[in-house]
Image: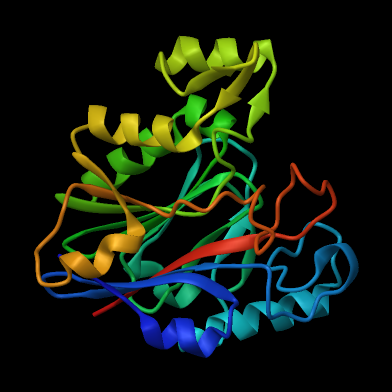
Amino acid sequence: MKVFVDYEILTKSKGSVSFAFNVLGSNFEVTLIFTTKNGGFSTGDYKSLNLSPYVGDDEKTVKRNRRRVAKLLGMEDFITIQQVHGSDIVYFGKEKLRDIRIEHLDIKADSLITDAASIPIGVLTADCLPVLVVAEPGIVAAIHAGWRGLVEGVIERTIESLQNLGAQEFLFFFGPSICEKCYRVGEDVSLIIEERFKTGIMNIAENKYVSLKSIGFQILKQMGVADNFLDARDIDENKEKKVSSIAYNINDCTFENRNYYSYRRNKITGRQAGIITLRR
């Protein structure tokens, strides 16, 4: 696989997308984006590009925001689901293409997988870690990973499901999320995480902080599907190289960077998205 920055989408988005990439596989192409909170139509606490229909924003405005983002991908909308901080997975198989509605679906899960072309899938976040996955021979996934989902195994279960579908090589994109300097937790949460992973907890001035991304990469490394954790801003340096077994890190903190929604910063707030779509 080869990875390129999609400058066309970044330019067209006028600030509503912070990162956009294309991945070229053996017989497929993937486009993936991470949105900001800018350039939409929502007002008040949800200003302005809120993509979630379940946080209290006006439903018609959310649909308008989603259409604006989907248009950048040449689509009318994208699939999202009811995220519940668990480890359940939804598979949208190409054999069920005619039954799939491209919109927000009333399905409770935290990971989506598809091998169907032109079916954009996404996860909604406001501090949790969005992980977008590309796998040969043409399968993609979108994972919503908070600390509870990580503990329950949402990443491991997704990778195992991809492997059961024939996935052999992987690229991972860790999107904007709250960083380890800002994600303070109580002793109860830190004990659960340390018992489960033996890593991911930082001690700063007698307080406990969580690194979702270090936990996520450790899981990938232990499963043997990613050997390197690289800065996504350096992707253009790899554009002539075949790459696999890499996790790319978008090192933006949603709490610190006010171009993103953050639940920790503002309890009533919108959601940005990580969206991935497969083309053949």
Residue at screen point 66% across, 64% down: 259
Residue 272 in view of the camera: yes
Left/right placement of residue 157 relative to residue 29 reads: right
Q: Residue furthest front?
A: 205
Q: Quadrant of the C terminus?
A: bottom left
Q: Residue furthest right?
A: 44
Residue at screen point 71% across, 73% down: 49
Residue 168: x and y in percent read 14, 49
Residue 278: x and y in percent read 33, 73
Quadrant of the image occupied by residue 189: top right
Quadrant of the image occupied by residue 182: top right
Nearest the eye: 260 or 120: 260
Residue 10: x and y in percent read 46, 81
Residue 100 in view of the camera: no
Nearest the eye: 217 or 14: 14
Q: Against 178, is 55 above or below?
A: below
Residue at screen point 68% across, 80% down: 39
Residue at screen point 44% across, 77% down: 98
